Image: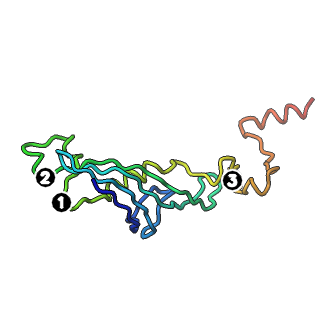
Amino acid sequence: MREVHRVVEAPAELGTEVLRIPTGSDLEIDVRLEAVMEGVLVTGTVRGRATGECVRCLEDVELEVDGDLQELYTHPDRLDGPQDDEEDEVRRLAGDLIDLEPAIRDAIVLDLPFQPVCRDDCPGLCSICGVRLETDPQHHHDSVDPRWAALADVNDLT
C-alpha cells in the first residue's frame, strides 16, 4: 500500500457548461494505491475550485469541489479472450503507470451541482425585462395575459 498526495494542473474541459474547474488550475489529489490480485485499487479524493455562473442571476459563482475516487486498474494480461461491454469499462495499467484523468473527471463532474446558484435564496432575474430582483425586490410588471384582456373590458362596464 502506498499513499500519495499531489497538486496537479486541471485538464481541459473539467466540468459542465455552467460550472467547471478552469484548465491549469490546481487540483489536490490524495490517493491510496493498493496491490490486489487483479491489479491496483486506487481510492482517495480530489479537490479543486470550480467557477461558473449562477443559473438564476448570472453572477459569478465559485465552489469548492471535493470528489471521491475508487477505481480498479487491472493488469493487461488479466483480460484474455473476447471482451464484452462490461469489460470495456475496466481501466488498465499501462506498464507501471496509471492514468487517473478519467477517474478524476468522473469524480469531479459527478460532484458538481446541476444548477449552481450564488446562494440558496437568490431571487434571480425578472423574466420579462431582466432586472436583478435582488437590487429591486418590489419590481413587477402590470401585464394582462392577452387571452384574458377582453374580460378587463367587461369589468370596466360595471
Q: What residue did someone put label 2 on? A: 76
Secondary structure beneath dot 1 equals loop
The mark found on residue 125 in the picture is 3
Describe residue 131's horizontal placement relative to residue 157 as left or right: left
Relative depth, front residue between 25 and 59: 25
- 3 or 2: tag closer to the N-terminus: 2
Q: Please, what is the three-letter code of the amino acid marked with disc 3?
A: Leu
Q: Mark 1–mark 2 contact, CB under 8 Å?
A: yes
Q: Residue furthest bottom?
A: 24
Residue at point 65%, 51% (across, down):
119
Q: Amino acid at mark 2?
A: Pro
Q: Residues within 10 Å of mark 1 (few under 14, many from 20)?
A: few
From what the image shows, is residue 22 above or below residue 70? below
CA–CA distance in space, label 1 to label 2: 8 Å
Q: Which numbered dot is residue 94? A: 1
Which disc, if any, is residue 24? none
Report the front residue among 59 and 88. 88
